[in-house]
Image (cartoon, rainbow, N blue to C red):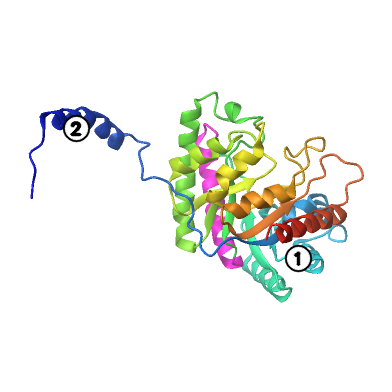
Amino acid sequence: MSFPLSRRRFLTTSALLPFAAASLCSPHARAAYTAIPRHSGPHLRPSLNAYSFLELLNANAKDKTKGLDLFGVCDFCAKVGFDAVDVTGYFFPGYPKAPADDYVIRLKRHAFNLGLAISGTGVRNDFTATNPATRAEGVQRIKDWIEVAAKLGAPTVRAFADSQPPFKNWQQAANNASRDTVEGYLADALRECADHGKKFGVIVAVQNHGDFINTGAEHLSLLKRVDHEWCAALVDTGKYLTPDPYADIALMAPYAVNWQIKETMRSEVDSPKVDMKKLISIIRKSGYRGYVPIETLSMRRKDYDSYIEITKMLRDLQAAIAATA
């Protein structure tokens, strides 16, 4: 049964039509980006980001008799009680090119034999650059490493939302283009990567790194503009440069598919140490189920020892998981 449209309702509806049409025609208008569906309550599994062994991995890359390789990182993770390892792409032979399949298969089997999952990998890219060739190079690299991740059984590939050397910041990389323009560069590139990730079952996890993305609101704005179910957040707890980074973490936790949990809240030795129990409580409240990789950094400490700092941080993480269960 139909009802006649009142004059007032007709005028109100008619007045809104231009705004609705403008919204639909806007190049930024897309279906609403929503939080990741969670089921059965939170479940957290400690992982280690291999970058924690940066100095030893770099030493091994120069001289195989020194330092540590990714196989050794896996051995350490199994020994101290991690559930998984995030094998950063930089430390594979031949990076930035994709490694040979035989290396990938050997590493995957080695981790499996140790009872470790591979929680992710990551590469360097710059989608803030005004030069289309620079952005295209990053897109291709992420596509290549999506396929590596699929072979490894890794669910995510980390992508940066920030500038890379030789640029000092995103404004320099973008030749002072507007933030809206640069966000468009990022969104278009990440959407293309996510389309490729969908084909291989690998999520593109976008990391905040204290340049273009300094806040949770900026992180979420970018993801909403990408608006792709195979593109989500990697939350770096040490790179929300705000008065209350825990609020930014809480905002982004519902959209997270991976983490980098740092020792301090600004990735600087003199910044406040992470309150692990508070952090894990926030992650639990979001219902997150999955890996929570930690990452330690030397932060120019002369007495820094990866083995000691990683083990200490793992114990803090395990204690916080138990205390908040």
Residue name at image x 49 percent, y 39 percent: 222
**1 left or right of 32?**
left
Do residues under tags 1 and 2 come within 8 Å of each other at their CB atoms? no
Residue 134, numbered circle: none
Residue 74, numbered circle: 1
Give the number of the mark in front: 1 or 2.
2
Q: Amino acid at mark 2?
A: Thr
Is there any visible trace of residue 96 in the rendered image? no
- Label 2, on which residue? 13
Quarter where residue 144 is shown: bottom right
For the residue pair 123 and 299, the one nearer the viewer reads as: 299
Query: Which comes before the other along the chain, label 1 or label 2?
Result: 2
Q: Which residues are magenta?
A: 128-153
Q: Which element is circle 2 on?
A: helix
Q: Position of residue 49 (x, y in %)?
A: 71, 55
Is there any visible trace of residue 291 in the rendered image? yes
Residue name at image x 14 percent, y 31 percent: 10
**29 left or right of 98?**
left
